[in-house]
Image (cartoon, rainbow, N blue to C red):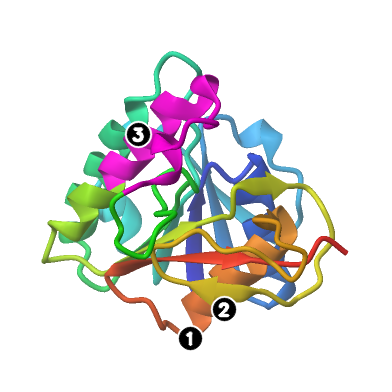
């Protein structure tokens, strides 16, 4: 498959890029600075996310949005999301896969309280969580594109690729030790599994893994 990755040099994007390459996909890194891409067998589209058009994206089967907004500019998660929605509308054969956050997941079965609503949620991450959540809400109100939004667990950290994970929908998950954890590496496995065998079309899902 032809996969374009926005934010391919970030923690999530770089792991998704590696996983995609390891599985034999044709990968294009969509980055502002081509010099940051050192992997072999990776094509590069040197372009800012806000400048992407339907013509840029129509060559891909899937475009992964792993864009990271700078501190103080968290609203760019929404802005970038909107640009990509419009671009994908003009590229009907291209699916959008969004790397989201855990903050917008629910912590109760009634789905009234999100992670970022809880008392212990770190204030420095609130704006990011809220804006990623807004991006999800806009996607849920968009009917004429094909998309998937993936939320990690509360602790999203560099770790090992176990190749195993548990998936859920809109509620925060915990592993066998009661921890809400997923490694970037296993998150990338889940992302590529979804790309290759879509099970969450036009919806959000989340993943948790063991900290081995």
Q: Earlier in the sequence, mark 2 or mark 3?
A: 3
Q: Residues within 10 Å of mark 1 (few under 14, many from 20)?
A: few
- The quarter in which the C terminus is drawn is bottom right
Residue 151 against residue 66 in the figure, above or below: below
Please state which of the two labelled residues, at mark 1 or mark 3, is closer to the viewer. 3
Camera-nearest residue between 103 and 114: 114
**Alpha carbons under labels 2 and 1: distance apart:** 6 Å
Q: Residue at x 56, y 63 (%)?
A: 173
Could you tell me if residue 6 is visible in this image? Answer: yes
Q: Mark 2 falls on what kind of element?
A: helix
Q: Residue at x 76, y 51 (%)?
A: 39
Q: Are marks 2 and 1 in contact (CB under 8 Å)?
A: yes
**Alpha carbons under labels 2 and 3: distance apart:** 27 Å
Q: Residue at x 45, y 44 (%)?
A: 115
**Alpha carbons under labels 1 and 3: distance apart:** 29 Å
Secondary structure mainly formed by the magenta segment: helix
Please state which of the two labelled residues, at mark 2 or mark 3, is closer to the viewer. 3
Residue under label 2: 193
Q: Please report the bounds of the magenta region as a residue range.
A: 113-135
Say the numbered circle drawn on residue 130.
Answer: 3
Camera-nearest residue between 179 and 20: 179
Q: Mark 3 falls on what kind of element?
A: helix
130 drawn magenta: yes
Q: Residues within 10 Å of mark 3 (few under 14, many from 20)?
A: many
Could you tell me if residue 85 is visible in this image? Answer: no
Say the numbered circle drawn on residue 197.
Answer: 1
């Amino acid at each position: 498959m032809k996969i374009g990755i926005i934010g391919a040099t970030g923690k999530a994007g770089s792991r998704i890029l590696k996983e995609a390459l390891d599985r034999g996909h044709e990968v294009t890194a969509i980055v502002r600075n081509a010099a940051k891409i050192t992997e072999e067998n990776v094509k590069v589209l040197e372009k800012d996310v806000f400048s992407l058009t339907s013509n840029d994206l129509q060559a891909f089967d899937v475009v992964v949005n792993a864009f990271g907004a700078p501190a103080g500019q968290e609203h760019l998660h929404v802005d970038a999301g909107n640009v990509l929605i419009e671009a994908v509308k003009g590229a009907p054969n291209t699916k959008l896969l969004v790397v989201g956050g855990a903050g917008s997941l629910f912590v109760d079965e009634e789905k009234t309280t999100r992670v970022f609503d809880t008392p212990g949620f770190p204030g420095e991450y609130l704006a990011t969580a809220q804006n990623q959540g807004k991006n999800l809400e806009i996607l849920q109100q968009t009917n004429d594109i094909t998309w998937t939004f993936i939320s990690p667990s509360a602790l999203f950290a560099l770790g090992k690729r176990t190749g195993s994970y548990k998936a859920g929908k809109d509620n925060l998950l915990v592993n066998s030790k009661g921890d809400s954890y997923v490694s970037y590496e296993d998150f990338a496995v889940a992302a590529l599994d979804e790309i290759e065998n879509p099970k969450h079309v036009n919806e959000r899902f989340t993943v948790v893994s063991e900290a081995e």
